[in-house]
Structures are given as structure tokens and as C-alpha cells.
């Protein structure tokens, strides 16, 4: 069951990445001038990170690592098994920032981070695919 859920979430992430690529503005000014685009991209980033964390939950089940009690414990249980553990922790921090800091979100930072985010996400889902082979 965990295997199927992981595959479903990977497909979801790939779909969200395609939308991010499709929606990505040509330049910073276009991004900063379009509040709807900013909100949409921030939401896609949040959705992707949520799906990454959900996959981590499924990996705990996949590896039969015991019952996690929180997101932190999920990630801690997986730490020895994930090459991209630090990257996932960065994602978690970004998600928390997006969720809890609506007033203080720096759209310029989001724009500059967007390309790296997409590349980093591809690294993470590639690792997930390798793990469940």
C-alpha cells in the first residue's frame, strides 16, 4: 500500500512541477508585478513540499521503521536512508515559512529560489524512485 501511495504522490509532484514550469515568469519584474501569479506559485511550492513530506511518511511504513509521532520524527527515522535529507529539511522550513509568514514573504526570494526549487525537487523524487525500486 505504501508503494502505491508513494507512486501517486510522485506523479502529483511531477504534475505540479510541470505547472510551475508552465507558469514560470520570464523575468523577475513579470513575477513581482503579478500578485495572482505569486500566490499560485507559492501554493504550488507548498503543495509539492507537502507531497514530499507525505512520501516520507509512506517511506517510514515502506521500511517498517515504527510509528512516527511528528513530521520531525518521520524525517529523523529516515535520516540514515535519505541522501537528500538536508534538502528535505530545507523544504520543510520553506513550507513552514510560506504557511506561517504570509505578511513577510519576500517575493524576490521566491522568484530567485524557483529554479533551484524545481531542480532540487527532481533530485528528491529521483531518490524516492530509486528507493522503491
Image (cartoon, rainbow, N blue to C red):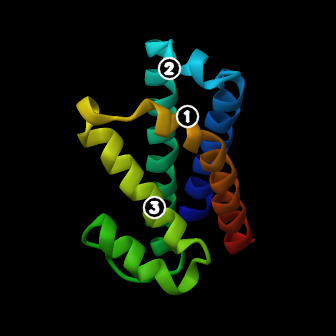
Badge 2 density bin: few <14, some 14–19, many ≥20, Cα 10 Å: some
Q: Quadrant of the C terminus?
A: bottom right
Query: Mark 1–mark 2 contact, CB under 8 Å?
Result: yes
**What is the x, y in percent for residue 128?**
65, 65
Q: In the rendered view, would you say 19 is above or below 127? A: above
**Image side of residue 31 versus residue 116, left or right:** left
Q: In the rendered view, would you say 92 is above or below 29? A: below
Residue 32: which numbered mark, if any? 2
Q: CA distance from mark 1 to mark 2?
A: 8 Å
Which of the 4 image quarters holds residue 20? top right
Q: CA distance from mark 1 to mark 3?
A: 16 Å
Q: Which secondary structure lies at badge 2?
A: helix
Q: Residue furthest bottom?
A: 80
Residue for badge 1: 111
The mark nearer the N terminus, 3 or 2, is 2
Which of the 4 image quarters holds residue 24? top right
Q: Quadrant of the N terminus?
A: bottom right
Residue for badge 3: 90
Q: State the residue at coordinates (48%, 81%).
A: 79
Q: State the residue at coordinates (25%, 39%).
A: 101
Tell us which disc is closer to us: 3 or 2: 2
Nearer to me, 45 or 25: 25
**Image side of residue 129 versus residue 75, left or right:** right
The mark nearer the N terminus, 1 or 3, is 3
Nearer to me, 69 or 75: 75
Q: State the residue at coordinates (61%, 43%).
A: 13
Query: Mark 3–mark 2 contact, CB under 8 Å?
Result: no
**What is the x, y in percent for residue 38?**
47, 23
Amino acid at each position: 500500500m505504501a508503494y502505491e501511495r508513494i507512486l501517486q504522490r510522485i506523479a502529483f509532484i511531477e504534475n505540479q512541477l510541470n505547472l510551475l514550469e508552465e507558469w514560470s515568469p520570464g523575468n523577475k519584474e513579470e513575477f513581482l508585478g503579478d500578485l495572482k501569479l505569486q500566490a499560485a506559485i507559492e501554493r504550488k511550492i507548498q503543495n509539492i513540499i507537502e507531497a514530499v513530506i507525505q512520501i516520507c511518511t509512506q517511506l517510514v511504513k515502506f521500511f517498517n521503521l515504527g510509528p512516527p509521532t511528528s513530521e520531525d520524527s518521520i524525517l529523523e527515522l529516515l535520516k540514515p536512508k535519505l541522501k537528500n535529507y538536508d534538502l528535505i529539511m530545507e523544504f520543510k522550513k520553506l513550507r513552514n515559512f510560506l504557511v506561517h509568514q504570509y505578511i513577510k514573504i519576500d517575493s524576490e526570494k521566491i522568484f530567485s529560489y524557483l529554479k533551484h526549487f524545481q531542480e532540487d525537487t527532481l533530485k528528491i523524487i529521483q531518490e524516492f524512485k530509486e528507493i522503491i525500486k
